[in-house]
Amino acid sequence: MQRTKYILFFLLGTAFCFAQNDAPVEKDTSASKPINIVHGANFTKDEAKFPGASIFSKDDRQVQFEHEGADLWCDIAIYYQKEKRIRALGNVRMQQGDSVEMTSGKINYDGNIKLAKAFESVVLNSNKTTLRTDTLYFDREKQESYYNHSGTIIDSANTLTSRIGRYFMELKKLQFLDKVHIDNPDYIVDSERLDYYETSKNAYMYGPSTITGDTYKFYFERGFYDTKIESGYGIKNTRIDYNNRIVEGDSVYFDKGTEFASATNNITVTDTVNNSLIRAHYAEVFKSKDSVFATKRAVSITLVEKDSMYVHGDTLMVTGKSENRISRAFRNAKFYKTDLSGKCDSIHTQEKTGITQLIKSPVIWNGENQMTGDSIHLLSNKKTEQLDSLKVIENAFIISLDSISMTGYNQAKGINLYGKFVDNELKIIDLVQNTEVIYYMYNDDDELLGINKTTCSKIRITMANNDVEDLTFFTNPEGDIFPETELPPASRLLKGFIWRGDERILTKDDIFDEDDNNLVLPVIRGIENPIDIDAEEEERTMNAGDPVNKIPILILTPANEDSTPPSGQVDEILLNPKPKPGERPKLKKLTTISSE
């Protein structure tokens, strides 16, 4: 009897639908096909509670409906045939082809717009990805699903949670907003917004984001991360805590497999163990070698007994573990601290011995005193980390401008020079072998007594406040104090005299030359607009440039906005081809071209 009632009702309802084809309607639903009843089981009506609806309940099989390639099963269905709507209750399952299956306690389905709203322990399985939430919207027209009150995504690599999420099924892309969190056995990700691709396992993050791994912590506010190999980059307010070093810069690239990180523009690399840092505009960090390479206005800053030592070169390299670390400054090397500065072609410092070598045309200034030689060595006390001694090897020469006449020069020279520091201040200087001196001597009223010109085997100069306090001559000194009128100007300069006072480094800023100060930095694009190199070609707003090295950027609008970006704000990101696992990354910086 129930079966007969159901058949009669269905025939009458179908006839009624055909009869209404010519009647005016508020909404055109002609594009949407009717919902087909595959298995109605038990049929009834309740006009008081559900006016105009047909109620179906399961028998030995669940109730089943079909609509344009999707099947719906449930225990009870409240079907509004005229409106093409279904309320499905109890053990609800929706299947779309072989790729999408959704289960829940309830589903409201609107066949006009092909939108399903699922409630109660919702589980959506698609493309080997599982989405769990309490309430989920499934838009079959756009092939998108979304939730607004917390959800969890699980795939083969990650477990991801967020408060708001959207799943683009055709793109196999997920977009998450608000308290996004990824759990992986090897790392944890937290972000304000994250776009994730199922196939590539790539994640794109916008807003404050942190990736925490076993040996690193990566923070940025715009960035990309390959979750399979733990590799990526950040391009806004970027910082990575990495093997006792903190790397900060406008953009930072990181690869766990090769234990490599690089940074571009306004970089600071802080050594938390040795209380030192490097600033530059390009740097590379090699974790396994505990090494740093830096260039472009590079400077190393080290604390030396409450005073900072600044070392600059066209290129800086710090290699090796802390107990056997070697620091190098190549080409146009300079250094500065409050009472000591210098320059040469290159500087080499070895932590194990405490020796700093100034190589090729070295010159140092201690107060007003200029010292030169074939090579200069500074020795530090490893325990106190203070300067201990100074060596000038071959052709040692000291010069200082006479501070009273401001025309003459006090000079001393020898084969070698040995200096001794006390509390980081140069106190004693010994010049040995074939030593000569020219010194302007004054009385207490600053009246010139004469010019001392002497030769001997050794000269000791005692210093006070970086000025000459006493001269002592050893072993058969020969010379005299000459009145100024009896010593011609040509005889007042020792052989090999070269005054380099115009090169003197007086402040920490003097270590940089004109090229350093006029350095043009590459522009880091994509800071304001999302970067998405996984997007399908038709979604990209640009399609120009070299197909290998130029990948257009996708400009995405937020999920709750329909606006499109204004013209003239499309960028390109310049990338080298992505490295294979185990291959050293070739990406060094993010440089882009913007159409204005």
Image (cartoon, rainbow, N blue to C red):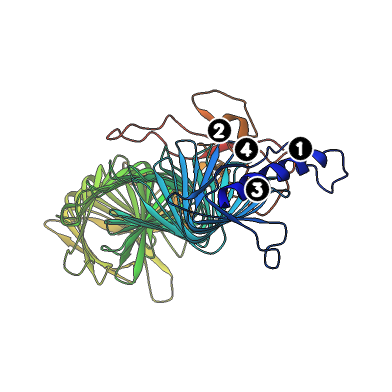
Q: In terms of secondary structure, where does tag 1 sit? A: loop
- Could you tell me if the residues under marks 3 and 1 are in contact, i.e. CB atoms within 8 Å? no
Q: From where the camera sits, is residue 282 visible? A: no
Q: Which residue is identified by label 3? A: 557
Q: In terms of secondary structure, where does tag 4 sit? A: strand
Q: At x 58% / y 30%, what residue is drawn?
A: 537
Q: At x 78% / y 38%, what residue is drawn?
A: 18
Question: Looking at the picture, which amino acid does disc 4 mark?
Answer: Asp
Figure quadrant of the C terminus: top right
Q: Residue 536, which numbered label?
A: 2
Marks 4, 2: nearer the viewer: 2
Q: Residue furthest front?
A: 1
Marks 3, 1: nearer the viewer: 1
Cα separation between marks 3 and 1: 31 Å
Which of the 4 image quarters holds residue 244? bottom left
Cα separation between marks 2 and 1: 31 Å
Which of the 4 image quarters holds residue 395? top left
Q: Earlier in the sequence, mark 3 or mark 1?
A: 1
Query: Left or right: where does residue 54 sit relative to residue 222?
Result: right
Q: Which residue is identified by label 1? A: 30
Q: At x 54% / y 64%, what residue is drawn?
A: 149
Q: Residue 253, which numbered label?
A: none
Cα separation between marks 3 and 4: 15 Å
Q: Earlier in the sequence, mark 4 or mark 2?
A: 2
Q: Residue 571, which numbered label?
A: 4
Q: Where does the image place residue 208, in percent across and percent down from the top left?
A: 50, 60
Q: Earlier in the sequence, mark 2 or mark 1?
A: 1
